[in-house]
Amino acid sequence: MSLAFLFNVVLRRFHGTRYEAPAFGTLFGIAIVVGMINPLSLGEGLIFDTRTLLLGAATTFAGPVAGVVALVFGVICRLVLGGAGVTSGVVGLLTAFGLALAFERYLRSKISYPAVGDVALGAVITLSIGAIFLIPFDIALGLFLEIAPVLLICNVVGIAVIGMVFRREKRYFEATKALEEHARRDPLTNLLNRRGLDAHVGESRFDAQNGHAFFFFDIDNFIRINDSYGHDAGDATLAIIAARLRNSLREEAIFARHGGDEFSIYLPSVNAADVEGIAERLCGLVSDKPVERGGTSFDVSISMGVFWSRVHCPLQEMINQADTQLMMAKNKGKNRAQVTYSAEGVNALAA
């Protein structure tokens, strides 16, 4: 239970980031250190613990980087503990890491069932016990015959259990993330909904040097489209416009549908001087090409309001500012963009 909890904590905090592998490596490394501090003593300076099992698990389930991190923890701890078996202990750790790495690279793909692969890995990393022969042979032989069977069983069973728990937690985590992401998506356009917009903007970091901007727009005379061509045509129009604009946006843009025919685009990094041009280009992408539906073709346009700032603003404030500009664009004849800037934006444009 505690193992599953720790795996879940690391996944929730670091999954999909560059820190995921180092975090898992640290988790396994700490477990290795704890095991080495509280081992089964085999004599003066000679200890038996689960270090090879945990090192193999880190390498195979969390990747080579995690394996290296766990290895560093183990080597440092073994050097600090000292004793007659320090050399064989360090060599054993290095050997276990090398065996796990080689197994994942050359053998894992040849085994159809993950559980069978885990059992095989447990057997392979047990070969690292050969490092014990770096101590005097008569002592090493006796210890080898005594602990080799126990180590083999420990490694095989341990890797199998850790593998089962790790994969189960990862499947559960990914399923949960998929459900969360689904709840943040608009089913018609596959854009973010308002909940998704709040989450993604909250997770983004705006560029305080260039500034950030919020584009808020709706479809001109959308009710007329529904009345003239039917609600299916209206839904198709929403999806087509969403696809057109999405394909033209840079990767960091956060595109959402607020409901009805209202959409927004948040750009976390954009110069004040570029905002108006971007807004006009987006409007043109919609109006320059008619929508075709069931043999019928009709023109569509959007009106857009934009707010730019170089300071942090609550999302709702940016929405309110952009919505005010959207209303002004509507009042000026529609099919256009209206832009407003915070004080520093006005100064930047004047300069």
Image (cartoon, rainbow, N blue to C red):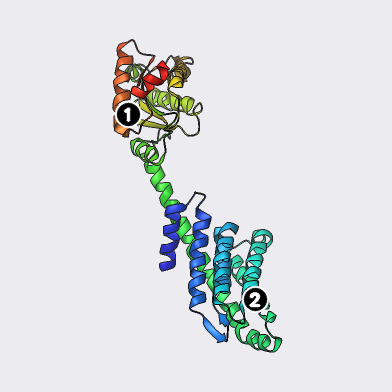
Residue 291 is situated, as x and y percent measured from the top left of the image, at 46, 18
Q: Is residue 156 visible?
A: no
Residue drawn at (40%, 26%) of the image: 238
- Of residue 63 and residue 272, the one placed in the foreground of this image is 272
The quarter of the rendered structure image containing the C terminus is top left
Residue 196, given in percent of the width and then of the height, sits at: 37, 39
- How far across and how far down the image is residue 88, in percent? 65, 77
Quadrant of res 276:
top left
Name the residue carrying label 2: 87
Residue extending farthest to the front is 351
Residue 318 marker: 1
Q: Quadrant of residue 348?
A: top left
Q: Which amino acid does label 1 sit on?
A: Met
Of the pair 60 and 69, the residue shown nearer to us: 69
**Residue at 29% across, 30% down:** 317
Q: Does label 1 or label 2 sit earlier along the sequence? A: 2
Residue 263: which quarter of the image? top left
Q: Nearer the viewer, residue 84 or 189?
A: 84
Residue found at the very far right of the displayed protein? 137
Q: Quadrant of the N terminus?
A: bottom left
Q: Where is residue 154 in the image (x, y as percent from the top left)?
A: 55, 77
Q: Which residue is drawn at 31% across and 28% down?
A: 319
